[in-house]
Amino acid sequence: MSGGGTETPVVCEAASGGGGGKKKDSLGTGGSPAHLIIKDLGEIHSRLLDHRPVIQGETRYFVKEFEEKRGLREMRVLENLKNMIHETNEHTLPTCRETMQDNLTQVLQRLQAATDSVCRLQQREQERKKMHNDHLIASEKQHIMQWEDFMKEQHSKQAEVDEEHRKAMERLKEQYAEMEKGLAKCPAFGELEP
């Protein structure tokens, strides 16, 4: 922008002055508006884009915090962790492995025994269910046969009853026919009176 064009003459002015301590003072204390703008731009640039001083300060603070204040505490903690891991790998882990293998063998034996017992119980239950189902099927067949026999017997009894009824009806018809004939032979009640 226009600030860039004004920057060059000021720099040149400062460079052209050979022994001008007075000129430096006049530039440092500022007087011209262009100089003030350039100075402000330099400060803005250093604050926004130049992070080296901040990063250097943070780095120094980190190194001071890590090395001076903490000393070798982290190293001691890491050494203790290393010792604990070594002890765990060398002593605790093999002991646990042996105990687990011993107990696992017993658990597997118990599990196998329990599985065998469950299989036997399941087989017995299946056999019992099969026997019960066979019994139910046989009982159902027997009931069906009894029902068929009963129905046949009922049909035959019905036929006998129907036959007896028909014969009784015929006897009654014959009897009534004979009674009518007998009545027809007898004189009428009105005719008997003198």
Image: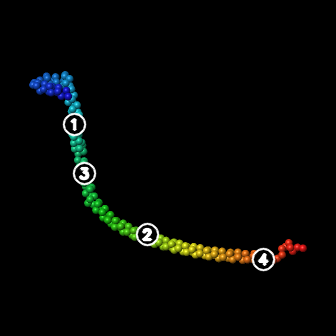
Q: Residue at x 19, y 26 (%)?
A: 2
Using the image, determine if residue 59 lies above or below residue 115. above
Q: Position of residue 124 (x, y in %)?
A: 45, 72
Q: Residues within 10 Å of mark 2 (few under 14, many from 20)?
A: few
Q: Are marks 2 and 4 in contact (CB under 8 Å)?
A: no
Q: Residue at x 23, y 41 (%)?
A: 62
Residue sticking out furthest to the right: 194
Q: Are marks 2 and 1 in contact (CB under 8 Å)?
A: no
Quarter occupied by the C terminus: bottom right
Q: Residue at x 68, y 75 (%)?
A: 166
- Closer to the N terminus: mark 3 or mark 4? 3
Quarter occupied by the N terminus: top left
Q: Which mark is residue 122?
A: 2
- Closer to the N terminus: mark 2 or mark 4? 2
Q: Amino acid at mark 1?
A: His
Q: Amino acid at mark 4?
A: Lys
Structural distance between the alpha carbons of marks 4 and 1: 150 Å
The image quadrant of residue 37 is: top left
Q: Position of residue 26 (x, y in %)?
A: 16, 22
Q: Nearer the viewer, mark 3 or mark 4?
A: 4
Q: Position of residue 14 (x, y in %)?
A: 13, 26
Residue receiving disc 3: 78
Q: Nearer the viewer, mark 1 or mark 3?
A: 1
Relative depth, front residue between 173 and 132: 173
Using the image, determine if residue 3 lies above or below residue 192. above
Q: Residues within 10 Å of mark 1 (few under 14, many from 20)?
A: few
Using the image, determine if residue 39 lies above or below residue 160. above
Q: Nearer the viewer, mark 2 or mark 1?
A: 2
- Closer to the N terminus: mark 1 or mark 3? 1
Residue receiving disc 1: 51
Residue receiving disc 4: 181
